[in-house]
Image (cartoon, rainbow, N blue to C red):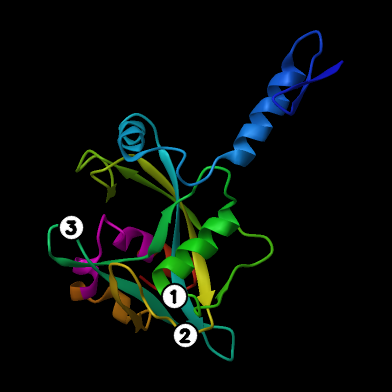
Amino acid sequence: MSQFTNGVPMLFCREGWLWEYWVMTRTALDFDENWFDDAEYARLRRRMPIPYVNAIPVRVGETGNVERIGLLLRSLEDGTLGREVVGGRIRFHETIRTALVRHAENDLGPMALPVIPPAISPFHIAEYFPTEGSALLHDPRQHAIAMCFIMEVRGECTPRADALSLDWLTPEETMRPDIVGELCYGQDHILRIALAHLGFRV
């Protein structure tokens, strides 16, 4: 049986699950990036893991080998400078692919032209914990789980927001002590795993 309530069709069955599925699906499609206000999101961060994507931008040469790796230089909240990989949280009802493209555009500019393969698969799952010293990666704001990707970039990068620059380094240069020491949240561990995944010695 079907009825309309406030213009929304409601389907009823013996168990009621079909009606619940319909309403939840419609609600999910209607939510946008402002679903949680800042205070509510801060409370959620303290109580549950938040899904993220991390992406390491690379330049690929004519032979198909990775020749350069991009690291962002950011202005941090405490006024210091630090390096990070591209990334951020996945929004509600957003695909992983869409999140990667969005963060690439936010961090690298609209002309970066990131290449997202048809079948995406992370090379690593990173876990950030709010308690310092409990894991290799530390994020004081939250417990975050990040799917990590290698992302080829073919266009012109113009870092935006709090990203001051994007430095293209050789794989060997990324392991210099001064560069490693500038990486935030323990992301040097992600970089090492990425280099090993690409076949470089670390």
The three-letter amino acid code for the residue at tag 3 is Glu
| Whole-number angstrom distance, CA of label 2 to CA of label 3 | 27 Å
The disc label shown at residue 77, or none: 3
Magenta span contains residue 182: yes
Check disc 3: other Cα within 10 Å, few if <14, some if 14-19, many if 20+: few
| Whole-number angstrom distance, CA of label 3 to CA of label 1 | 22 Å
Q: Quadrant of the N terminus?
A: top right
Question: In screen coordinates, is 87 left or right of 7?
Answer: left
The three-letter amino acid code for the residue at tag 1 is Gly
Q: Position of residue 76 (x, y in %)?
A: 20, 62
The disc label shown at residue 142, or none: none
Q: As displayed, is residue 54 above or below residue 52? A: below
The residue that mark 1 highlights is 109
Q: Earlier in the sequence, mark 2 or mark 1?
A: 1
Q: Secondary structure at mark 2?
A: loop
The residue that mark 2 highlights is 156
Region in magenta: 179-191
The residue located at (43%, 66%) in the rendering is 106
Q: Earlier in the sequence, mark 3 or mark 1?
A: 3
Q: Secondary structure at mark 1?
A: loop
